[in-house]
């Protein structure tokens, strides 16, 4: 014998099925949780200073910096506004290019200022020496190229530089006005664990 469901039963039915839907959608995948930083291996934060010499070589048959976007011809030739270069610049312990290789500066810089020579630098300092080998520091900042000292933020890092923050100061030591080749001293001040 079939029996037509009474109204209270229909209401009960739909209530049960909506509870079931809620139960399914409330399944917990633990996508976010708070970790104990001590158990995560983060001990005392420390401050490290590096002094490195960064070599931007535009000339010769093996340039380490190449222009990948030319500035529009209508722009002032003194600002290079709109130009973008990709670099893989060696960084050495001393000011000479033949000094010990510590790592490479990989990334790009673009000329971002219309009224002066001002670049945006986006680069990773990739360490290749000793305990830092394989670790990186990410730098993102404004480089007013002709100033004596340019400061740029360290925005992060990897490996030994996880959770890094800090800043760099760049000082041009050698600039060949004809080729544009430059050696720049970088002092890096980085907080990390
Ligand atoms: C740095 O690490 C790479 C890859 O693990 C290795 O091939 C290289 O020999 C290391 N360099 C130094 C100087 O330890």
Image (cartoon, rainbow, N blue to C red):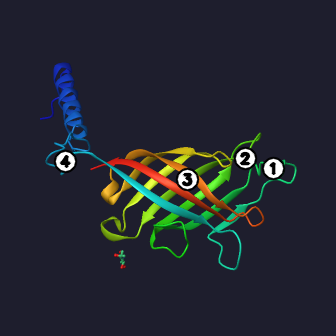
**Disc sitting over residue 117 in the figure:** 2
Left or right position of 106 against 57? left
Tell me the tag on residue 166. Answer: none
- Check the image and report above or below for 96 versus 72: below
Identify the image quadrant of the N terminus.
Answer: top left
- Horizontal and vertical percent for residue 101? 46, 72
Q: Position of residue 112 (x, y in %)?
A: 69, 45
Whole-angstrom CA distance, mark 2 to mark 3, is: 16 Å
Look at the numbered discs 2 and 1 and tell me whether their residues touch, using CB distance below 8 Å: yes
Asked if the residue at tag 1 contacts the one at tag 3, i.e. Cβ–Cβ closer than 8 Å, the answer is no
Left or right: residue 58 versus residue 14 is right
Q: Which residue is at a point 75% across and 42% down the rendered structure image? A: 116
Vertical arrangement, residue 88 with respect to residue 24, above or below: below
Reading the image, the residue beneath label 3 is 122
Residue wearing tag 4? 43
For disc 1, the marked residue is: 78
Could you tell me how far apart the alpha carbons at marks 3 and 4 are, in whole angstroms? 29 Å
Ligand 1 location (quadrant):
bottom left
Q: Earlier in the sequence, mark 3 or mark 1?
A: 1
Tell me the residue at 58%/58% (across/down).
Answer: 184
* Residue 87 sits above or below residue 81 on the image: below
């Amino acid at each position: 014998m079939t029996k037509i469901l009474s109204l209270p039963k229909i209401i009960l039915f739909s209530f049960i099925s909506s509870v079931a839907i809620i139960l399914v959608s409330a399944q917990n995948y633990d996508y976010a949780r708070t970790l104990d930083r001590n158990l995560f291996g983060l001990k005392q934060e420390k401050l490290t200073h590096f002094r490195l010499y960064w070599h931007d070589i535009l000339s010769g048959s093996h340039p380490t910096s190449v222009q990948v976007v030319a500035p529009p011809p209508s722009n002032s030739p003194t600002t290079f506004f709109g130009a973008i270069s990709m670099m893989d610049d060696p960084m050495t312990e001393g000011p000479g290019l033949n000094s010990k290789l510590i790592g490479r500066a990989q990334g790009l810089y673009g000329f971002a200022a219309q009224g002066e020579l001002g670049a945006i630098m986006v680069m990773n300092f990739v360490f290749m020496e000793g305990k830092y080998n394989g670790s990186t520091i990410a730098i993102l900042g404004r480089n007013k190229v002709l100033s004596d000292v340019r400061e740029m933020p360290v925005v992060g890092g990897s490996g030994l530089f996880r959770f890094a923050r800090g800043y760099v100061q760049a000082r041009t030591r050698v600039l060949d006005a004809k080729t544009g080749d430059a050696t720049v001293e970088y002092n890096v001040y980085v907080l990390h664990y």
